[in-house]
Image: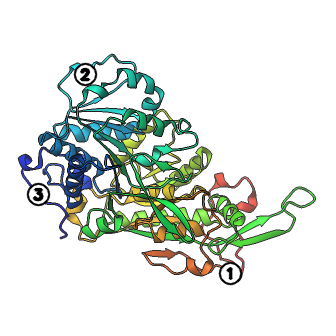
Amino acid sequence: MGTVSFSLASAAQAGGASSDKEQRANGSSPAVPLEPRQWQRRLIQLLRARLVQDRAGGQDVLIHAGPGAGKTFGALLSFQKLHQEGRLERFVVLCHRTSIAGQWRQSAERLGLVLRTWEPDEESDLTHDPHWHGVLLSYQSAARHRQRLEAEGPWAALGPWLAIADEVHHLGLDPEEPEAAAWGHAFSRLTRQAALRLGLTGTPFRADNLAFCAARRQAVRDGDQVVEQILPDLCVEPRQLIAAGDVRPLEFRFQDGWVDHGRPGADGEGSGESETSPLSAESRESWRARNLRRAIKLGDSSSIALRLLLGSRRRLERLRESHPHAGGLVIARDIAHAQTISRLLEEQGDRVHLVHSQDSEAANRLAAFRQGEADWLVSIDMCAEGFDAPRVRVVAYLTTVVTRSRFLQAITRAVRMDGERAALEPVPRRPSYVYAPADPLLISYARSWSLSEPYLLRSQPVQALETPSASAAGRAQLPLQAIDERAGTLLRVRGPELPAFLKPNPSLGQTAARGA
């Protein structure tokens, strides 16, 4: 039986019990109070040192810690310790989603901290109420009501206080148009008087090449250029959490194949010429992107998406032999695509919850999935940061979004452990699985998902043309496997019969087996 990476302690030693979420993130039963992990103790020491040292930029502290590290617990416990020492009086938490706000409230309550929510429509004079430790508000509220908060907010009466930015990479800073990045601008204005500004992130980079708040920058040489690098003050890599047994490792299954690009004939039908492109070996960026758009369609003649999805189902069935409540997550492209995937899974006898941002019942369905009321959760944009469901063991990535941050946010939904499973499994933990089309960019991200890569701020964003070569795609450095690596030959993709609802055209119901 594996051990966990923290020390058990009495409630008095631990300073109060943590939330169920944080205890699960620390790999323990919710009934057992915990001591901080090693990195959380280092965080307390780091913040204490910054408070007593007067140095330029010392008020900004950036923590990069992978999913399951316990960032919420670490931040709150740090405030609690420094508050007990008389170094800090209050704290303010800003976050970007309602679901994440709920987790902060639960964690604070279990630590005995009173966290009030700032609501713009409610009259609340916190400056004359001594019975609270922290204030919680969203990035959107802070940006929308910035002037009111500057004039009426409790900032002046907080004394020495700690500003916490959850998933701080959302707080972009644009030096040319400061107010264009409204969330980052509001955070910078509202927290100018904070004794410390603590940024928490699991993905410390942005697709738009902007810097973000609470992050120090350091000049580094990149080839023949001098650029700036975002420099975390404390970095906890996923591979460290995996080695400690705090989170699960991931194994990847990339479905390869050849993608047909037919041209319409003179009659407007598909009687014209066609071209084929190998999914994993395509180096031309325009073709790579076009291949992926075709590959995620369940009704495409290549059957890549269908084979991927059915492989995901088989994997989940095998996992349930040892983990009966295991569930799967599908990341779809859009609502119509998600509905097609849901119908296919339901035709196979699975219970499915579909969630998206336009669904008023999405929060209830997410909660129901966490409780085990569905086998699969199909989502477009609801299951990245802040979504915590340790029962997720399989992720099927069927979307055209190929930024590194979005891919990592999606696949790491499957790394979390809960207390029950932590007590049953050895260290290293049993892996979770990611199924995705064999897109070269996704394959490259999979190789380095458990490592921390530097975020460099360049004058011009690096073009996505820097795709790995076909030979590089075959050299796996982490648990990485292509279902079929015969790129360059035509795959036999007969597979199972497509469901009836996917057959608007009879030709889609039977994929010809093409010899190599």
Whole-percent x and y of residue 232?
37, 57
Q: CA distance from mark 3 to mark 2?
A: 38 Å
Residue found 23% across the figure and 50% down from its top: 53
Check the image and name the residue furthest to the top. 123
Q: Is residue 9 shown left or right of residue 497?
A: left
User: Mark 3 sits on what residue?
Assistant: 8
* Residue 432, percent from left and from top: 38, 65
Task: Judge the density around disc 1: few (<14), some (14-19), many (≥20) Cα neighbours within 10 Å.
Answer: some
The earlier-in-sequence mark between 3 and 2 is: 3
* Disc number for residue 240: none
Considering depth in this image, is 93 or 98 the residue closer to the camera? 93
Which of the image's four quarters has the C terminus? bottom right
- Secondary structure at badge 3 equals loop
Amino acid beneath label 3: Leu
- Please, what is the three-letter code of the amino acid marked with disc 1? Thr
**293 with respect to 33 (left or right):** right
Residue 512 image offset from top left, x and y in percent: 72, 72
* Depicted 59 relative to depicted 158: above or below: below
Q: Amino acid at mark 2?
A: Thr
User: Mark 1 = which residue?
Assistant: 489
**Viewer-side residue, 1 vs 10:** 10
Give the answer, above or below, for where 477 lies relative to 432.
below
Residue 285 appears in which quarter of the rendering?
bottom right
Per the model, the C-alpha gap separating discs 1 and 3 is: 56 Å
Which residue is the site of mark 2?
A: 127
Q: Quadrant of the N terminus?
A: bottom left
Q: Quadrant of residue 141?
A: top left
Tell whether 204 sits left or right of 78: right
